[in-house]
Amino acid sequence: MNIKHTIKKTAAALLALALTVGATGCDFLVTDNEKDLKQTVATVNISSNLKSAEMECADDVQKLIDNKGLSTDIPKRDLIAYFLSTGYMYVQSYGYTYEDTFNMLMDGLVEKKILTQYAVAYFLEKDDALTADACLAFVNEQIDAASGKEKDLLSANREVLTMKYFLTDEEYDEAVYSLKKSLNDSLDSAETSYITETTDEHTHDETRTTPTNANVEKEDHIPMKDGALDYDIYTGRNALDSCGVYEKVDGSTVTSRKKAYNAFLSNLQGYGLIKEGEDTAVVTELDYYYLELSSTLGSALVNKYTEELKEEAINKLDATYVAAKYDEIKTSQKTAYENKPTDFDTALDSVSDTSFLLYGQKDFGFVYNILIPFSASQTQAYSAAKSNLKGDALYNARKEILKGVEAKDLRSAWFCTEEDEHYAYEATGTAYYNNNGEQKDYLFFENNMTNTDKYEKLTQYAGQYPYNGKAELVDDEWDFTPNKMKIGTATESGFIQEMEAYINHVVGGEVASGDWLDGYNESVYTDSVTKKVDYSKFMYYAGKVELDNKSRSDFFNPKVGTTETVNDSYQALSAVNELMFAYSTDTGCLNSYMGYVVSPYKTDFVSEFEYAAQAVVAGVDWNKDGTKDFEGGVGSYVVAPSDYGWHIIYCSFVYDADDGDVYGGFKADEMEVEGTFSYLFYESLKSTSASSYTSTVQNQLLNQYNNDNAVTLHTKAYQDLLELDE
């Protein structure tokens, strides 16, 4: 299968030198000797080792080196830059000595150089169409086709074109984009110090957790337009509209951007990275930029080679192997947890979409919790009651206070006058749940919901529930009038009815409904015989979503398996999850894998919540006649109180399974179907196997090539750095 190749978006090494100098206090690194920075601290040439390994490409690699198409030298400048970006933290935070730190950094620089050269060798060996002569011809053609300053820069940095020769156009564009973005990100950060004083404070409500991946761009997204990269570095000396899709920081002006860029140039100059008399008007015409580009393209080529290794590992994972691995893990887990429910409970805490518990036990599961809290005045009233009352008298006092608890949409925090912190957009059309009548409706996360080519998807988030209230932008400030809802009763509509209506809207039918329970209307909660509190008396409401599909294999899948049928359990779950983000003050459940773990044993939850959560997972015999009055299971929900307010508890997943097999085995026909369990399990194995294999192969390469035949350390050139501890 195809593997998406990505270049991690990390700032290049020399960038740290340009923008962090002066902030680290590393005055000892300042040198007025440009020649000192150009000293070679190590030389790497693996061509003789390639020849010893009988690789046919050895002579081609040497030819590229001889013609300056492949560099062998590591300048001291790179070592110092690496220290500023990474090593300084080891000295200041981890107690490393300077000597140990610089030796560690040297190892890293040497290993990267080895891997870059070997990646060139690998592709020369693999593809007969790739040769040193063809590469050098390509380099010369590109230089000849250039003119002016670009021609001079390419001539001085031939390795840039060598790396480009071994990359596809898409891979090259991705690398250039990653470099330009890292430069813009760093300039953005530096610019904020120049605009803080002149920018008015923006209007913003209190913070509110957003779903995972909100406004997050896909790592492999490259902004292209008419076949060219639609992105450039903004310095203030060029026009903003010439920088493609780059978006300036809030409060940015031409003046503030120029100040940031000038500070950047000043630091480069202080470290000898700008040549005397060099024209600095265009950042991409700096010699420094080409040094960075060479490093970035080298990393891209190493990443490409790494992806080839991953592909080799993944090709070994056929369906038979994956199915056998599933059975092996399930058997191992059964042995570990079958008679140890406490250990099983602990194991559930670590479950994720990359870490699976395949073996199941009865009456364990996960729940979502929407907590509608007491207001400040209600909290105060309840505190007063607790100081004067006990037992049933206190519970009855709490019941009266709970009648006035109101749900309020908390997503006003997602509105902001600063664009990078503003998540709301005006809803139009009929594909969303309109609960506001004629006034404007606002949905959230337009990028994720409508532009999935560029932005990550929001999982388990329906995205159709607008802000419940009136939101207006008045004089550049957001003003809110939230609608408030009590929990609801059998005769008066409230939050319960709102939740059920939204679930029905998202799933597409009258599927969610429930019953009002009489127990909570009683005034006696303590059993006269056992003298223990009967928590069933607190249960206010119990409901269930009638689901056609409850397959655990499709928990994360909007469609059912390999079909085009909508997965109603996923849709219902997504609706409840969205309402949890809108109303719940229990932030511990937000962005959790499947919610809170629930076991049939004593838990750390407050007693009322524990009882209710166990009821929605495993069902409950309220009448104590030996039969379940409420079956529980996926799609079940109840409403119960606690000292925190109202809890609406929804069962998202159960671990009760036939023969202990939660997912019913690995399904080969679903291993390529995104969202299914078999897909996630396969992806996890791929990731683990690929990571292990690439790490093993690269370590073997470094052991083979990192020796005196290939590597020469020029210790005298950086001896002054090793002696900084003295």
Image: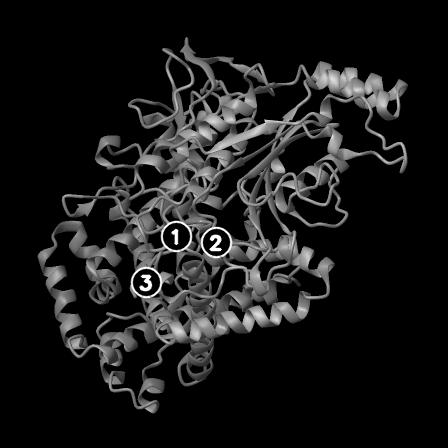
Q: Would residue 225 appear left or right of 370 to someone viewing this image?
A: left
* Residue 310 seen in the current view: yes
Q: Which mark is residue 596?
A: none
Q: Position of residue 137 (x, y in %)?
A: 12, 70
Regarding mark 3 in the picture, which secondary structure is present there?
loop
Frontmost residue, 382 versus 609: 609
* Residue 723 seen in the current view: no
Frontmost residue, 78 versus 580: 580
Amino acid type at circle 2 is Thr
- Quadrant occupied by the N terminus: bottom left
Q: Disc 1 to disc 3, how far (Cα)?
A: 41 Å
Looking at marks 1 and 3 on the same chain, the residue that comes earlier in the sequence is marked by 3
Q: What residue sits right under mark 2 in the picture?
A: 31
The mark closer to the camera, 1 or 3, is: 3
Q: Position of residue 537 (x, y in %)?
A: 75, 30
Q: Position of residue 262 (x, y in %)?
A: 37, 36
Q: Which mark is residue 3?
A: 3
Regarding mark 1 in the picture, which secondary structure is present there?
loop
Amino acid type at circle 3 is Ile
Frontmost residue, 289 versus 275: 289
What residue is shown at x 52% (from left), y 43% (from top)? Answer: 22
Q: Disc 2 to disc 1, how far (Cα)?
A: 8 Å
Q: What residue sits right under mark 1 in the picture?
A: 272
